[in-house]
Amino acid sequence: MTSPVAFRLALALALLAAGASQAIVYTLRPGTGAGTLYERLGSRTVLEDDIVVNGHKGGLRVGTSSLAFADAVATIKALLVDYRHSAGARSLLLEEPSRKGRVVRHYVLSVGNAFDTLVFSVDLPAQALAKGREPVWPRRLPTPHADRVGLVLSLAGRDALFGSFVSGQSVSTVFRDYDARLQEAGWKKLSGHPRGGAVYVDRKMREMVTFAVLEGEAGTRAAVFLASVGGMK
């Protein structure tokens, strides 16, 4: 996986797993027909895998849409009742109405590369994101200094791990602390910035870690993604 793709996937997984208060729960306008939001944006699937989230099995799809982000937003706006979105924002997080104990979320992101819009979708049992017993942090990643572990996820077919956590410390403090923990554990930093995140490889150049940090309402939210080098292209 190239580092920009890994970085976006780490951020998207962190946001998809965020609290429901951060997602717009949408209702389709009458007469708009069937089909998921993912399908309505003409998404071409580039990654599809089974995932395990906090011990519960689910599914992940990542798709590219040929729609420019502004056109994707216009499409979404025309479909939904009571649409709400900040005009200057370059991403959208939406949740489908409750479906018999399952949670379906879509994260629509402007990228402006060879394709204009990325669409990430997860389908999970509601128990996977329910409050209760805190998930166990993956042993293959350094343990963070965190107020709360938010999500632990694995992609079944790709030897990939993901973890997210929340800290009351500032973005730069969280970055410095976990950056030091990764390097102490033997990960070599290839690039990074304390206001965004960094990319690391192991000594044998076989595995890559992408570490992303972003400011949230409840403090700093961090995402850590581990995958084999080249295994997620």
Image (cartoon, rainbow, N blue to C red):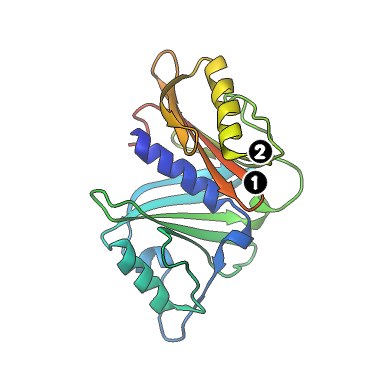
Position of residue 37 in the picture relative to residue 19 (left or right): left
> Which quadrant would residue 35 be assigned to in this image?
bottom left
Q: Mark 1 or mark 2: which comes first in sequence? A: 2
Q: CA distance from mark 1 to mark 2?
A: 7 Å
Q: 64 or 113: nearer the eye?
A: 113
**In the rendered image, which residue does mark 1 sit on?**
219
Picture coordinates of residue 122 (x, y %)?
A: 50, 54
> Which quadrant would residue 166 be assigned to in this image?
top right
Q: 108 or 194: nearer the eye?
A: 194
Image point 57% across, 39% down: which residue?
171
Image point 36% across, 40% down: which residue?
5
* Few, some or many residues within 10 Å of mark 2 (<14, 14–19, 20+): some
Q: 130 or 5: nearer the eye?
A: 5
Q: What is the residue that sits farthest to the bottom in this orientation? A: 31
Picture coordinates of residue 81 (x, y %)?
A: 50, 80
User: Image quadrant for the N terminus?
Assistant: top left
Picture coordinates of residue 124 (x, y %)?
A: 57, 54
Three-letter code, disc 1: Gly
Q: What is the residue that sits farthest to the right in this orientation? A: 132
Q: 159 or 65: nearer the eye?
A: 65
Q: Is residue 137 visible?
A: yes
Q: Secondary structure at mark 1?
A: strand
Contact between marks 1 and 2 (CB within 8 A): the answer is yes
Report how many numbered discs are placed on residues in the image: 2
**In the rendered image, which residue does mark 2 sit on?**
169
Q: What is the residue that sits farthest to the left in this orientation? A: 114
